[in-house]
Image (cartoon, rainbow, N blue to C red):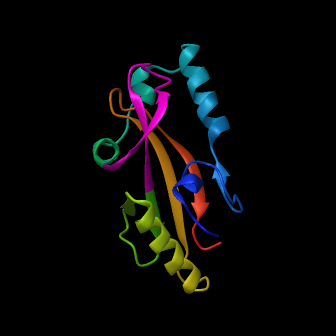
Amino acid sequence: MSLSVGALRGSGDRRGQVDHRLARQHLVNEYRRGRLSQEQVCDAHPELIRAAKNVGTELEAVCPICADGQLRLVTYVFGSRLPAHGRCVSTAKEMAQLSRRARRSQGRDELTAYVVEACVECRWHHLRTVLPLNS
């Protein structure tokens, strides 16, 4: 699988990819119906917000919760021989290197990318996509 920035945004080869758009829409709907408070849904870890501010990819969409903040994508990769807290990937080149490493290991080095969208204004976040890098 050739991984590009486009693949991180939901296009391209989708084998093994898990999309969380339905869960996201359900959460947003529950908030808008008043069943969840802003404090319940805007609880992103400070480290995620820091990563979103500094290395996140800005989206054209505004936050569905506060309607003020610009959403940003942050990608973390988890797997063997990576830190337990994962590795925040900030460039397509870095992602391509990790993907090549995973493919070369022939299953011994399974890596998974988690793409999270976050609002740096209200601290809302949601897991957007999960995709294996060694497909």
Residue for point 45% across, 74% down? 97
Residue 116 vs residue 60, the one in the foreground:
60
Query: Is 66 contained in the magenta span?
Result: yes
Query: Is 59 contained in the magenta span?
Result: yes
Asked whether residue 35 appears in the rendered view, the answer is no
Instruction: Where is residue 42? Give x, y as percent.
Output: 40, 29
Instruction: Where is residue 9? Give x, y as percent.
Output: 56, 48
Q: Is residue 122 above or below residue 13?
A: above
Residue for point 32% across, 41% down? 49
Asked whether residue 69 appears in the rendered view, the answer is yes
Q: Is residue 108 above or below residue 127?
A: below
Task: State the quadrant of the N terminus.
Answer: bottom right
Task: State the quadrant of the C terminus.
Answer: bottom right
Q: Is residue 134 left or right of residue 47?
A: right
Q: Is residue 107 above or below residue 84?
A: below
Please give the range of residues in magenta: 55-75
Instruction: Where is residue 70? Give x, y as percent.
Output: 40, 29
Where on the picture, by quarter, is residue 38?
Answer: top left
Instruction: Where is residue 55? Give x, y as percent.
Output: 33, 50
Residue 116 vs residue 96, the one in the foreground:
96
Residue 109 vs residue 84, the one in the foreground:
109
